[in-house]
Image (tube, grey):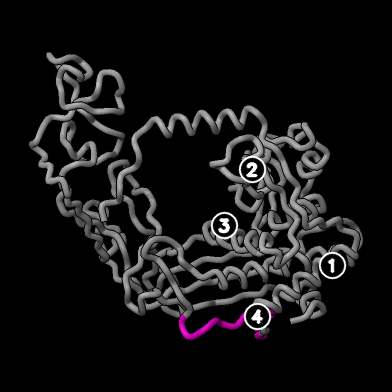
Amino acid sequence: MNLEQLHQAVAEDAALRRRQRLQPAGGQGDKIFPPTYPGEGPSDPPRHVLERRRIEGEERNCVLIDSVQSQANRLEEALLAAAEAGRIRLPRLTVNFPGAGLNSVGPISVLEAPHRIFDAILRDSKLEDKPFRESGLGQALRQATPADATAILQAAPTALVFGAWNSTGEGGGLGAKFARAIVSEVIGVDVPVEEVADRRTGEITLRNAGRRTGSRIDPLGIIKAAAEIYEHKDNPRDWTIDPQEAAGGSENPKKYTGKKGSRGEAGSPTKINHSNFPPTIDQMGVTCAYALQTQVLTFAGLRRLRFGADEGRNLAARTYLAALGIVAMIEGNRQGMALRSRCDLVCEGGLAPIEIVAFDGTTQETAIDPEAAIALHEAAFDAARAAGFALDPEPITLEPQEKLVELVRLSQQKALADEGGEADGE
């Protein structure tokens, strides 16, 4: 695909898509661990997202392996890595936390901020000694709408590719919304499940058939009955076995309970992560016939964005955003799909082709390898500049406001004063 072909597709076609079949890195049938979400009730264990989907004309049991939101974050990460490596020119904003003495935080790019250009991290920073929202750029971004998104295109074009909402803006959350131009999701297909009927209503729900085991063997050989563990009178996060040092005094020493949700009985060595933990079995982990990644870059959606009255200028901007979305897809594949612990996926039978989808549903395959995607993006970047857009590849650096720096410092102090997290027991 060259720039002229992309121009035509953005102007006339519906979308660009790829449907990629994947397998675990351990081979077909190896167990993988999708993300978990809270149960319906407060005491319900965490669960995978199981659902019935219609695939290839049949209803199939599926599991969510990587959500649209998570995939967007991964694609943004791939774009940021390409920009920082000098592979692409990418306008962006960065908040300089190390410059404020917070070296443990590091600089945070608009591609890493959860709400992108309208995130609170940027809102609570400053540009040229002004609160960012009150700066010239900040005001231009607040005034941007889909009817004229020029300010966002020039400062943070990825916000138009992955979507953004000025939810903390004017009108009590009625700020401008910019829909996603690219959607990517990964599911597992043909997942073994158990069908469970509600005793009262008879409603059938799906329950994961996979199991995860866990245990902990204490190399010190400390047994649960070794001693009572008490909360220390001088520090409720510390423990003692001496009743004289216990909160409540020796007459009524307070048993150590640990953090909320920690395992073990109050007053037991297990509450301080000593002693053995008995083996456990959780309904976690799945197997599937294959995983399916579906990616769609909508040209029709891009045509809803305007950047002034000139149609040539509008087409140049939309084509640049489309090229940025294509680079995100390709760079995402280059980085691989190590999604989380025990969820590492690889392509099945090589990369699937990218298709251009017309309004009548017909498709045309197009060849775009990593270097071709980069070349296409750079040509679209230059064309957008020639159309009059001020696209500066050098990041705009913001400084965090003092109140934000202090809030981060206080949070770090509180976290460091607490006990470290527990191992997952696997």
Q: CA distance from mark 3 to mark 4?
A: 22 Å
Image quadrant where residue 372 sits: bottom right
On the image, the x and y values in percent for residue 129 come to 77, 32
Residue 286 within the segment the image draws in magenta: no
Measuring 56% from the left and 30% from the top, which residue is drawn there?
A: 407
Q: Which residue is mark 1?
A: 382
Q: From which residue to which does the magenta span run?
A: 348-365
Q: Which residue is mark 2?
A: 119
**Which numbered disc flags the more N-terminal residue, 4 or 2?**
2
Residue 360 within the segment the image draws in magenta: yes
Quarter of the image with the N terminus is bottom right
On the image, the x and y values in percent for residue 99 come to 66, 38
Measuring 68% from the left and 84% from the top, which residue is drawn there?
A: 366
Q: Mark 1 or mark 3: which is in front?
A: 1
Q: Which residue is mark 3?
A: 73
| Number of the label disc, if any, that sits on residue 369 | 4
Left or right, 144 with respect to 120, comes to right
Measuring 47% from the left and 74% from the top, which residue is drawn there?
A: 292
Kindly identify the amino acid type of the residue bearing the numbered disc 1. Asp
On the image, the x and y values in percent for residue 217 come to 17, 51
Kindly identify the amino acid type of the residue bearing the numbered disc 3. Asn
